[in-house]
Amino acid sequence: MEAINKYYSDGIVSVESSSGPGMPAEMKGIEAIKEKNKRFFDNNELNGEEVNGPFVGENQFAVQYTGRPVPSLLLQSAYAIPPYEVAAR
């Protein structure tokens, strides 16, 4: 949560590839993103993580995340490369 508090805008928009039970594909606002992250870590334990990047564009960047969950509902590594847009404050 420290990185969310430090780097994310209050008006953040998170867009996933699909929705899930009680989790819409698009979430708006810092409180919704904090709850999304809390829910993930309350329900998943990671046995390791790998982070690569950043991969930088003109006003966007991406970071590759790979998490290896402890045996749970996730049977394989969780892999994501979310793009972030940089906006002037």
Image (tube, helix red, strand yellow):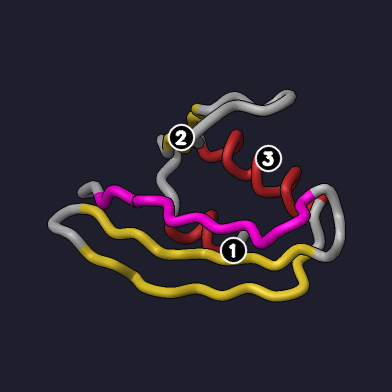
Nearer the observer: mark 3 or 1; the answer is: 3
Residue range (magenta): 74-86
Mark 2 or mark 1, which is nearer the start of the sequence? 1
Callout 2–callout 3 Cβ contact below 8 Å: no
Please state if 7 lies on the left or on the right of 70 as rendered: left
Task: Indicate the position of residue 39 as horizontal and vertical percent values.
Answer: 75, 43
Q: Residue at x 71, y 59 (%)?
A: 76
- Badge number at residue 2: 1
Foreground of the two, 42 or 78 = 78
Which disc is residue 35 wearing? Answer: 3
Report which residue position mark 2 lands on.
15
Viewer-nearest of discs 1 and 2: 2
Amino acid, disc 1: Glu
Mark in the foreground, 2 or 3 = 2
Check the image and report above or below for 67 versus 30: below
User: Residue extending furthest front?
Assistant: 75
State the separation of the CA atoms marked 3 and 1: 14 Å
Name the residue rendered at 23%, 65% in the picture: 56
